[in-house]
């Protein structure tokens, strides 16, 4: 049986080489920084799919159209020790957040990601997120502005 603490790392290794549409060096850099605690991918609808893991398993998944994230509002919150992503003005609640333990899906205006332990102040993580958003800004403008889940 695989040790539970290894599950996020195994998931990251399984996803990174098999990423599909639109995967970039920016996404690989983000996944490397997070080291399995967060796994980021881009789906065919240009939605950022963010899986967040704890010591046991994936506990949350956030989906957001990449064009609806405000690059200028990306920041590190010292109080939360987290990287914060927020929706662009006029696109409130652009994040679709699924909490697996609660079996619920909520729409929210922000997403908080745990700061990678080796990235004090989250500068490298913020740079990688900004590069990803800039790389997809032009092509993402035609996508819906609310995260959509498959039913």
Image (cartoon, rainbow, N blue to C red):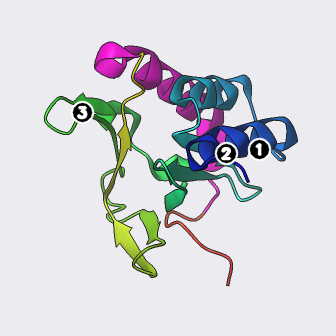
Dot in front, 2 or 3: 3
From what the image shows, is residue 130 above or below residue 148? above
Nearest the eye: 17 or 3: 3
Is 130 part of what is drawn in magenta? Answer: yes
**Marks 3 and 1: CB-CB under 8 Å?**
no
Q: Which residue is mark 1?
A: 15
Q: Position of residue 128 (x, y in %)?
A: 53, 23
Q: Which residue is mark 3?
A: 81
Q: CA distance from mark 2 to mark 1?
A: 8 Å
Give the secondary structure at mark 2: strand
> At 76% from the left edge and 36% from the top edge, which residue is drawn?
13
Q: Cα distance, mark 2 to mark 3?
A: 23 Å
Q: Which residues are magenta?
A: 119-143
33 magenta-colored: no
- Quarter of the image with the N terminus is bottom right
Determine the CA span between mark 3 and mark 1: 26 Å
Where disc 3 sits, the SS reads loop
Q: Residue at x 43, y 74 (%)?
A: 101
What is the crowding at mark 3: few (fewer than 14 residues within 10 Å), some, or many (at least 20)? Answer: some
| Labels 3 and 1: the sequence-earlier one | 1
Q: Which mark is residue 149?
A: none
Q: In the shown orientation, is residue 144 left or right of residue 95?
A: right
Q: Badge 2 is on which residue?
A: 41
Q: Which image quadrant is residue 91 in?
A: bottom left
Q: Residue furthest front?
A: 1
Task: Mark 1: give few (<14), some (14-19) or many (20+) Cα within 10 Å.
Answer: some
- Please report contact status of discs 2 and 3: CB closer than 8 Å, yes or no: no
Q: Earlier in the sequence, mark 2 or mark 3?
A: 2
Up-down: is 46 above or below 98?
A: above
Q: Is residue 74 visible?
A: yes
Residues at circles 2 and 1 in contact by the CB criterion of under 8 Å:
yes
Image quadrant where residue 99 sits = bottom left
């Amino acid at each position: 049986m695989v040790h539970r603490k290894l599950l996020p790392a195994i998931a990251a290794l399984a996803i990174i080489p098999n990423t599909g549409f639109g995967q970039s060096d920016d996404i690989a850099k983000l996944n490397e920084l997070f080291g399995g605690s967060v796994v980021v991918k881009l789906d065919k609808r240009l939605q950022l799919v963010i899986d967040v893991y704890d010591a046991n398993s994936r506990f949350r998944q956030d989906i957001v159209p990449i064009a609806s994230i405000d690059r200028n509002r990306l920041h590190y919150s010292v109080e939360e020790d987290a990287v914060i992503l927020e929706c662009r003005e006029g696109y409130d609640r652009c994040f679709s957040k699924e909490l697996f333990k609660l079996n619920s899906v909520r729409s929210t205006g922000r997403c908080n990601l745990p700061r990678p332990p080796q990235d004090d102040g989250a500068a490298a993580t913020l740079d990688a997120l900004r590069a990803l958003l800039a790389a997809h800004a032009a092509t993402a403008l035609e996508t819906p502005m609310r995260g959509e889940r498959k039913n």
